[in-house]
Image (cartoon, rainbow, N blue to C red):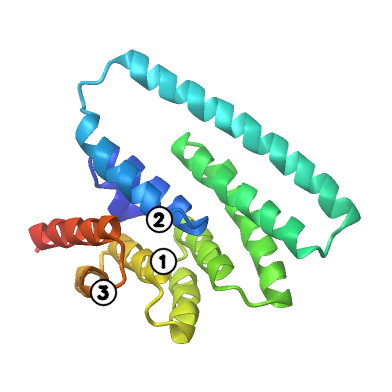
Amino acid sequence: MSALRKQRPIVKIGLWVLVVMIAVGLLGTTVAWYLEDAHKIKPSDSSATETEEEDLLSLELKEQEELRKQYEGLRASNPDDAAVLTGSARVELTLGALYLHNDDKEKGMEAFQRAVGFYQQVLEQEEDPDLRLELSSAYQYMEDYEKAQAELEKVLEQNPGNIKALTQLGMLLEAKEDWKGALEIWEQVASLDDVEELTREFARSRIEEIEKKN
């Protein structure tokens, strides 16, 4: 995601996490984390803080790998169970993001590819806009922007005011460096009546960032 890599380190981390958390439906919480920590954490933070972050990342990777093994066992006895496939997909999506953050792109891409397969199996059984958003997130991490956007458009065809889909599309268009398209989406999000204030504030922050680039 080239646009994210150009951000300041803390902003980049916040946006990576934002995409993942959108997938599991915690947009409001993540926006709060992003806005607060972007001000708290400074480039002069000590190496001890970086070490602590690495330790937490290592621990989370270990826990998610254990979950992956558990889901492998569940799929062995229930290969077509939608709940098992959904859980498998979400674990792989999380693993992919963690491996990318750990600078292990190969393992990250492998995890995302597995996630895509599981999401597709579930969506063949039943349509679920939230799972389609998660599938789009996986494609976006893989930098397959066309497929990612196609999944978002499917969701928006059914519900043009879907906040998660619009927010994810804004991030996607930024990743594609389609600043005009991204600006239009963020302006739409910021103007919606039923959007949470934190999400509106995030949309406005993205508008400001884009306007600085043009």
Q: Which residue is mark 1?
A: 164
Nearer the N terminus, badge 1 or badge 3?
Answer: 1
Tag 3: amino acid: Leu
Nearer the N terminus, badge 2 or badge 1?
Answer: 2
For image coordinates 21% across by 73% down, the residue present is 191
Tag 1: amino acid: Lys
In-image side of 81 versus 146 (left or right): right
Q: Which residue is mark 3?
A: 192
- Horizontal and vertical percent position of residue 97: 50, 45
Q: Is residue 179 visible?
A: yes
- Horizontal and vertical percent position of residue 2: 32, 53
| Quarter occupied by residue 95 | top right
Q: Of all residues shown, which one is farthest toward the bottom? A: 157
Dot 1 falls on a residue whose secondary structure is helix
Pick whichever, 146 or 79, lies toward us.
79
Q: Are marks 2 and 1 in contact (CB under 8 Å)?
A: yes
Pick whichever, 142 or 201, lies toward us.
201
- Horizontal and vertical percent position of residue 183: 20, 70
Which of discs 1 and 3 lies nearer the camera? The answer is 3
Pick whichever, 157 or 193, lies toward us.
193
Location of the C terminus (image quadrant): bottom left
Q: CA distance from mark 1 to mark 3?
A: 13 Å
Q: CA distance from mark 2 to mark 1?
A: 7 Å
Label 2 packing within 10 angstroms: few (<14), some (14-19), many (20+): many
Nearer the N terminus, badge 3 or badge 2?
Answer: 2
In-image side of 164 versus 204 (left or right): right
| Quarter occupied by residue 77 | bottom right
**Marking on residue 27:** 2
Q: CA distance from mark 3 to mark 2?
A: 16 Å
